[in-house]
Image (cartoon, rainbow, N blue to C red):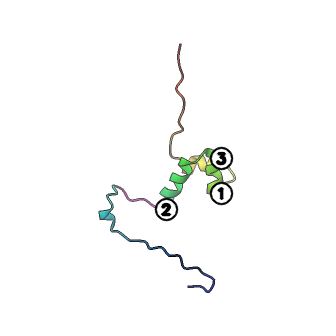
Amino acid sequence: MHSNAVALPCQIELVPIAETGLKERFTDHDIRAKVASDAEANHARQLMGHADQKITDKIYRRKAERVVPFKSK
């Protein structure tokens, strides 16, 4: 441990993937995309550190936007 490092009182229990009930494996990229998809568009761009919203939308925003249905007369 580095001299300026702080030890945190936490424990992480590692569990075999077969015991988790997960149906599919995922990566850190999947988690990054989940965060970007759950946030509002501009906030997602800021979280990802992108200067251009198009990059965030094209690569990381995986959920469809919710829209209000059009009411016909």
52 or 33: nearer the viewer? 33
Label annotation for residue 49 = 1
- The kind of secondary structure element at disc 2 is helix
Q: Is residue 7 above or below residue 22?
A: below
Give the amino acid type for the residue marked by disc 1 in the picture.
Gly
Q: Amino acid at mark 2?
A: Asp
> Which residue is situated farthest in the front direction here?
9
Q: Give the Cα separation between the discs numbered 3 and 2.
A: 21 Å
Q: Residue furthest right?
A: 51
The chief SS type of the magenta part is loop
Whole-angstrom CA distance, mark 2 to mark 1, is: 16 Å
Residue that carries the numbered disc 2 in the rendered image: 28
30 and 72: which is toward the camera: 72
| Helix, strand or loop for disc 1 | loop
Residue for badge 3:
42
Density class for disc 2 (Cα within 10 Å; few <14, some 14-19, many ≥20) is few
**Disc 1, disc 3: CB below 8 Å?**
no
Q: Is residue 23 magenta?
A: no
